[in-house]
Amino acid sequence: MAACLMLTTAGSEREARKLARALVDRKLAACVNVIPRIESTYRWKGKVETAREWLLVIKTSKARVKAVEKAIRELHSYDLPECIVIPIEGGSKAYLGWLTEQVKG
């Protein structure tokens, strides 16, 4: 099983928790860490913006990436939600085994 991390942000704590819960409930993620109150600076529609956001670190499998992306687009309030995939190159065999079991479809 190829494990990966996915990153997205949310504009409120409530939305971040809703996304995290939905991904775990749907067995699309084994675990989602919600990191509160980050500050993001970005260009949107020709203007530089700054916003307070909540970062979600999603632990899943490569086989579930497309389904996670679809769920994020479905549940997210942003027009263009962040969705970045980072492969996990190694780690605790026991933890990665647990991760695999949690996201089996």
Image (spheres, helix red, strand yellow):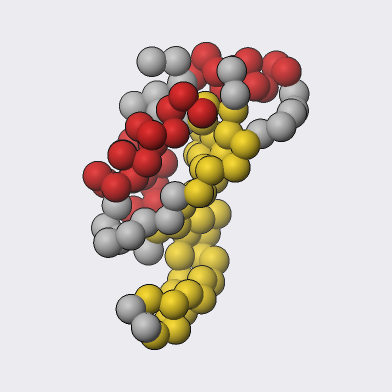
Residue 38: x and y, percent?
Answer: 54, 66
In the picture provided, is 79 more to the left or to the right than 5? left
Task: Name the residue at 37% across, 41% down.
Answer: 69
Q: How many numbered tags mark residues here?
A: 0
- Is residue 77 at least partly visible in the picture? yes
Q: Residue furthest front?
A: 46
Residue 4: x and y, percent?
Answer: 58, 34
Name the quarter where the N terminus is drawn: top right
72 lies above or below 88: below
Name the quarter where the C terminus is drawn: top left
In the picture provided, is 93 more to the left or to the right than 43? right
Task: Name the residue at 41% across, 41% down.
Answer: 20
Residue 97: x and y, percent?
Answer: 63, 15
Viewer-proximal residue among 81 and 77: 81
Task: Name the residue at 59% across, 24% down.
Answer: 2
Q: Quadrant of residue 51?
A: bottom left
Residue 50: x and y, percent?
Answer: 46, 79
47 lies above or below 100: below
Viewer-proximal residue among 54 and 46: 46
Q: Quadrant of residue 43?
A: bottom left
Task: Name the residue at 51% across, 71% down.
Answer: 40
- Is residue 34 at least partly visible in the picture? no
